[in-house]
Amino acid sequence: MSVTHKKRLVDKFSEPTSLNELGHLLVRHLNNHKKWNKKRTTNNDKVAGLCWELYSRKVGASHYAPIGKSTNFWNADRYPAWTGRLWLRMKSQGDFWVSDLFDDSCTYIGTGGGGDYDSPWTAVYEKWHTIHKQNNYNKKPDYPEPRLYSWSYTIWQEDWPLIQKNFEEEFVFHKLAGETKKSVKHVFHWQDPKLDKLDSEWLKNV
């Protein structure tokens, strides 16, 4: 990623000051990504849910690095990051790899792809595919297919200085309170509230 990519994001959505704000920014970014322009759609409601479970620790810059830094596969420098796993649920499907939507997000996906991966939507995903299998794959269930994806995920702390500043202040606060955590966990969970209700009703009635 470059300074230009970061500037475009900030100019469009404003600079986030917390990881939760960054999560909501990412949802808006994915919904409005230029990749969708090929489908000539004006629907900006394509993401059904986005969640992550991240830990603060240093990560080697082997495949991707903070803005302005270099990667080195064999002898990677290590930088503070929030890293873990991201889950994504989509309503729409494009004629491109879903992972392409993260190319200019100033956040980084790693290994993963399509599938449940112990997501927050395991129940509806497994029920949908069980019914589809029972129908010998000839007839899909009378409910939209849960389009799930997941990857390992990294956010470099220095790429988001306002978040990093608030995070460090919070870390110091916990340290002064006697908490000696080497790594801090952060969980972000966003889902379309309408879909959440529809999932519950469908699971109850099938």
Image (cartoon, helix red, strand yellow):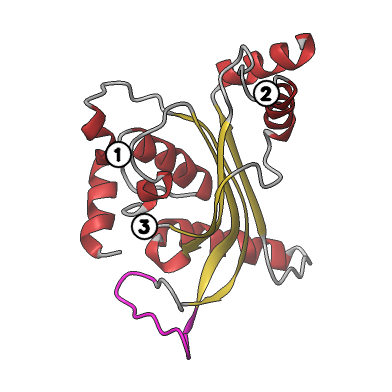
Between residues 36 and 179, which one lies in front from this camera angle?
A: 36
Residue at the disc numbered 1: 33
Between residues 68 and 195, which one lies in front from this camera angle?
A: 195
Q: Which span is picked out in magenta?
A: 66-78
Relative placement, left or right, of 101 versus 130 is left
Quadrant where the image shows the C terminus = top right
Residue at the disc numbered 2: 132
Circle 1 residues within 10 Å: few <14, some 14–19, many ≥20: some
Question: Residue visible at 36% across and 49% down?
Answer: 100
User: Looking at numbered disc 3 in the image, what kind of residue is underneath it?
Assistant: Cys
Disc 1 secondary structure class: loop
Question: Residue visible at 66% across and 19% down?
Answer: 199
User: Looking at numbered disc 2 in the image, what kind of residue is underneath it?
Assistant: His
* Labelled disc at residue 174: none
What separation in Å lies between label 2 and label 3 (alpha carbons)? 37 Å
Residue at the disc numbered 3: 106
